[in-house]
Image (tube, rainbow, N blue to C red):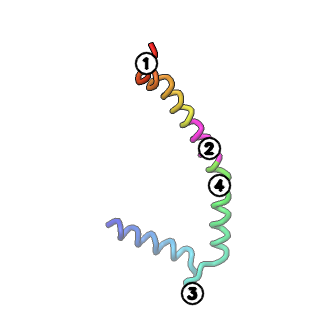
């Protein structure tokens, strides 16, 4: 079932990207490159903010919740 769905998706993508002779056109390649560049400018900064947020939360969680319970200094 999954292989059938993947095959249909592959055929749709190949049909959309290829011309009558089966070659990928330069316009499609340029479009893909532009899309990836724009996505990099949008996604990468957001990933950095997300990673910073996660690391800050984990540091706070470790320092406030876990460390005092495991390494009790009282």
The quarter holding residue 37 reads bottom right
Residue hosting label 2: 48
Q: Position of residue 12 (x, y in %)?
A: 48, 72
**Secondary structure, magenta segment, majority class:** helix
Under circle 1, the secondary element is loop
Mark 3 to mark 2 CA distance (whole Å): 43 Å
Q: Which residues are magenta?
A: 45-53
* Label 3–label 4 contact, CB within 8 A: no
Which quadrant is the N terminus positioned in? bottom left
Under circle 3, the secondary element is loop
* Label 1–label 4 contact, CB within 8 A: no
**Foreground tag (1 vs 2):** 1
Which quadrant is the C terminus positioned in? top left
The residue lying furthest to the left in this view is 1
User: Residue 40: which numbered mark, if any?
Assistant: 4
Q: Position of residue 9 (x, y in %)?
A: 45, 69
Residue hosting label 1: 72
First of labels 1, 3 by sequence position: 3
First of labels 3, 4 by sequence position: 3
Name the residue rendered at 55%, 83% in the picture.
22
Q: In this rendering, would 28 be left or right of 15?
A: right
**Foreground tag (4 vs 2):** 2
Q: Judge by depth and name the residue closer to the eye, 46 or 35.
A: 46
First of labels 1, 2 by sequence position: 2
Q: Judge by depth and name the residue closer to the eye, 37 or 58.
A: 58
Q: Please say if 31 is above or below 72.
A: below
* Label 4–label 2 contact, CB within 8 A: no
Mark 1 to mark 3 CA distance (whole Å): 72 Å
How would you rate the neighbour count of disc 2 (Cα within 10 Å): few for under 14, some for 14-19, many for 20 or more? few
User: Residue 18: which numbered mark, if any?
Assistant: none
Mark 1 to mark 4 CA distance (whole Å): 45 Å
Q: Position of residue 10 (x, y in %)?
A: 46, 72
């Amino acid at each position: 079932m999954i292989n059938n769905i993947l095959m249909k998706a592959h055929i749709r993508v190949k049909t959309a990207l290829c011309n009558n002779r089966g070659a990928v056109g330069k316009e499609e390649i340029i479009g893909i490159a532009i899309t990836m560049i724009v996505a990099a400018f949008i996604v990468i900064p957001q990933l950095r903010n997300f990673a910073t947020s996660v690391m800050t939360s984990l540091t706070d969680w470790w320092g406030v919740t876990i460390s005092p319970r495991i390494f009790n200094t009282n």
